[in-house]
Amino acid sequence: MADERIRAAVASDVPAVKAVTDAAYHRYIERIGLVPVPMRADHAANVAAGRVFVTGEPVVGLIVLEEHDDHLFLDSIAVHPDAHGTGVGRRLLRFVDTRARELGLPEVRLYTNAMMWENQKIYPKYGYEVIERRVDGPYDRIHYRKRLD
């Protein structure tokens, strides 16, 4: 990929943020029987709030982050299927760690739907540990955290 920078998304990125998110999560609709939450997000509001970071030109990957007093929450990570296996996800996850450290936060938290079993293999490889499994409304979620040094 020619452009490996990760940058804050701007308003003109909103259509790409929606397109990449939809492409990344669409395959899960049938499996979980619901539209995944990231597909229903208000992408324009998230971009305006400075919560979205993108990579690629055109955009092929993104993360949505939410700062809390004691952790950084990785609300969503999306990599376009055409970019799978190119290191985009790995770079985005490293960026999350860097961002948390820059903000002085000691850990990163996230959750994934229990039916997205691929993620349950990926996150532990990057230092995330399961802290609980909880049903939130119609979603069966596995919650993770990564303590930073």
Image: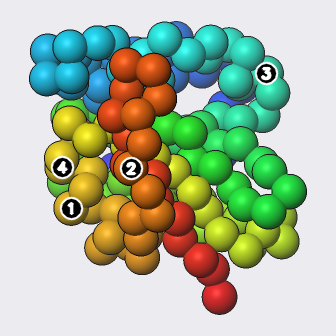
Q: Nearer the viewer, mark 3 or mark 4?
A: 4
For the residues marked 2 and 4, what is the alpha-carbon distance in whole angstroms? 16 Å
Q: Nearer the viewer, mark 3 or mark 1?
A: 1
Q: Does residue 92 appear left or right of residue 147 in this picture?
A: left
For the residues marked 1 and 4, what is the alpha-carbon distance in whole angstroms? 5 Å
Task: Mark 3 or mark 1: name the one nearer the start of the chain.
Answer: 3
**Residue type, numbered disc 1:** Lys
Rendered position, 113 above or below 117: above
Which of the two residues, 13 or 108, is positioned nearer the viewer here? 108
Task: Mark 2 or mark 4: name the one nearer the start of the chain.
Answer: 4
* Residue wearing tag 1: 121
**Which residue in the rendered view is the most extreme toward the left?**
31
* Residue wearing tag 4: 118
Which of the two residues, 35 or 8, is positioned nearer the viewer here? 35
Residue 67 seen in the current view:
yes
For the residues marked 3 and 1, what is the alpha-carbon distance in whole angstroms? 32 Å
Which residue is depicted at the point 62% across and 12% down? 42
Where residue 99 sits, quadrant-wise, is bottom right
Q: Does residue 85 appear left or right of residue 35 in this picture?
A: left
* Residue wearing tag 2: 133
* Residue wearing tag 3: 48
Q: Are marks 1 and 4 in contact (CB under 8 Å)?
A: yes
Q: Position of residue 59 (x, y in %)?
A: 45, 32
Which residue is depicted at the point 20% across and 14% down? 33
Graded by Cα atoms within 10 Å as few (under 14), some (14 to 19) or many (20 or more), the crowding at tag 1 reads few
Q: Position of residue 50 (x, y in %)?
A: 78, 34
Marking on residue 46 = none
Q: Secondary structure at mark 4?
A: helix
Rendered position, 71 above or below 14: below
